[in-house]
């Protein structure tokens, strides 16, 4: 299961989101967080329709999106999404 995390430099909510996702990685061994910067990873951000940072996308093993959050997601939201993706 992959969690794609779009961030941008000097984004305070992005730092909070990073902390939430680090906790998810600690709690869910199958979780893998991939952080992308919207300024450097423009093509991927456009493909995923990113308009706001932070944005978190959770995909299942087949690559299907099961959850998307703009802004800082709660730990509970991401854990529920991770369970759906497994």
Image (cartoon, rainbow, N blue to C red):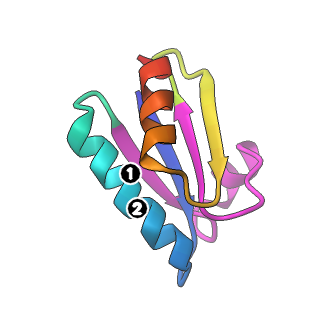
Left or right of 85 in this view: 46: right
- Is label 2 in contact with label 1 (beta carbons under 8 Å)? yes
Eyeballing the image, is 85 above or below 76? above
Element class at badge 2 = helix
Location of residue 6 (image quadrant): bottom right
Eyeballing the image, is 68 above or below 51? above
The image quadrant where one finds the N terminus is top left
Rendering coords of residue 3 (x, y %): 46, 40
Q: Is residue 48 magenta?
A: yes
Residue 72 numbered tag: none
Residue occupying the point 73% across, 44% down? 47
Element class at badge 1 = helix
Residue occupying the point 45% across, 55% down? 35
Location of residue 29 (image quadrant): top left
The image quadrant where one finds the C terminus is top left
Rendering coords of residue 28 (x, y %): 27, 32
Identify the magenta region. 32-58
Callout 1 crowding tier (Cα within 10 Å): few <14, some 14–19, many ≥20: many
Instruction: Kindly identify which residue carries mark 2.
Output: 18
Q: Residue furthest bottom?
A: 10
Residue occupying the point 57% across, 72% down? 8
Location of residue 18 (image quadrant): bottom left
Eyeballing the image, is 35 above or below 30? below
Rendering coords of residue 16 (x, y %): 45, 68
Q: Nearer the viewer, residue 74 or 51?
A: 74
Callout 2 crowding tier (Cα within 10 Å): few <14, some 14–19, many ≥20: some
Residue occupying the point 64% across, 40% down? 68
Q: Is residue 59 magenta?
A: no
Instruction: Kindly identify which residue carries mark 1.
Output: 21
Cα gap from disc 2 to disc 1, whole angstroms: 5 Å
Eyeballing the image, is 3 above or below 11? above
């Amino acid at each position: 299961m992959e969690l794609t995390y779009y961030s941008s430099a000097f984004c305070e909510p992005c730092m909070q989101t990073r902390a939430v996702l680090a906790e998810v990685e600690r709690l869910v061994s199958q979780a893998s967080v991939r952080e992308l910067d919207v300024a450097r990873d423009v093509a991927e951000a456009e493909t995923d329709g990113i308009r706001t940072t932070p944005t978190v996308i959770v995909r299942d093993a087949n690559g299907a999106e099961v959850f998307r959050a703009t802004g800082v997601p709660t730990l509970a939201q991401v854990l529920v999404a991770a369970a759906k993706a497994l």
